[in-house]
Amino acid sequence: MKLPRILVLGFAAGCLLSWQNVAHAQSSAIQALSKRIDVLQDHKTISFKKTLNVLSSVAGVAIVIDQTTLKPGRRLEDIENLPVRLPKLSAVLLPSILSHVTKQVDGSYRIRGNQIVVVFDKPGANTLIGGATSPLGQKLEALVNKQLSRKVSIKKMDEVSFDRALYALAYQNNLNVLVDAEGFARRGNKEVFSATVSMPQLKNVSLSTALQRLLNQVGGRYQVRDFVLWIEPASRK
């Protein structure tokens, strides 16, 4: 398995990120959307400004806020200081992370020249290159569903952490994964990433079957949402 190139940065209380360039494109902004991002630590409250600054640095593209789209009475400083949740991630495409964080501040993003611009005129409507309703987004979602139907073989894993098992599946099968750690915490599983799981050796089973077998051990399920595999509690409050 080809491992990603690593770029390590400090982020708030020790968050580390890395990126993998997986495609070529015409402009720096479009090229940035094909990069995968790792967040090696779960952060419950990070300012929106810090999040954008680090994503911008790691992806190598300017990510800016369009002040002209702010609602009357809202200041740029108010938006920048809003806390957002940035969960532990592994090899997730930049558009998925941008969708995740911009929705938390009632915004969305657009490609404008060689920049990624955060706007507030159509909250959550990431309809351009990076959005789930765009041609690229539809293609990525189709690829996720295709991957889930593939027949795979899984090596036996005895009493390993849930995150180790999950992200091994993700890396080996080119999946982009987001875990709703906050949702698991509300269901009483505050340490879902470190939960102990085991997997028998599996041969010629669908990836979706292997994945759900793993998720059953932490009371989880998956959904394909915004061209990413979203892991959440099987029953939600």
Image (cartoon, rainbow, N blue to C red):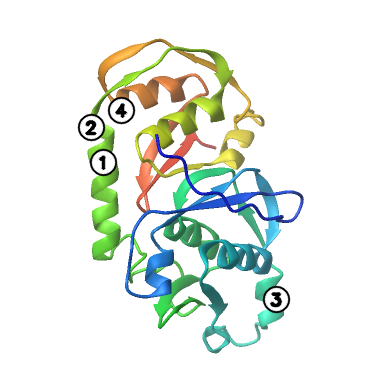
Q: Which mark is residue 78?
A: 3
Which is more foreground, mark 4 or mark 3? 4
Circles 1 and 2, Cβ within 8 Å, touching? The answer is yes
Asked if the residues shown at circle 3 and circle 2 are in contact, with their CB atoms under 8 angstroms apart, the answer is no
Q: CA distance from mark 4 to mark 2?
A: 6 Å
Give left or right: position of 82 versus 166: right
Tell whether label 1 touches label 3 (CB within 8 Å). no
Q: Which one is nearer the viewer's eye here, 29 or 105?
A: 29
* Disc 3 from disc 1: Cα separation: 39 Å
- Is 27 placed above or below 33 here? below
Q: Amino acid at mark 3?
A: Asp
Name the residue at 56% across, 68% down: 56
Choose the circle earlier in sequence order: 4 or 2. Answer: 2
User: Which residue sits at x=55%, y=30%?
Assistant: 163
Whole-number angstrom distance, CA of label 4 to CA of label 3: 43 Å
**Secondary structure under the numbered disc 2 in the rendered image:** helix
Binning the other alpha carbons within 10 Å of mark 1 as few (below 14), some (14 to 19) or many (20 upward) gives some
Compared to residue 32, the image places residue 217 above or below, namely: above
Residue 149 bears which disc, if any?
2
Query: Which image quarter: residue 183?
Result: top right
Amino acid type indicated by mark 1: Asn
Query: Which mark sits nearer the N-terminus, 4 or 3?
Result: 3
What is the count of numbered marks? Answer: 4
Residue type, mark 4 in image: Leu
> Residue 207 got which mark?
4
Question: What is the x, y in percent for residue 222?
Answer: 40, 35
Asked which secondary structure carries label 4, the reply is: helix
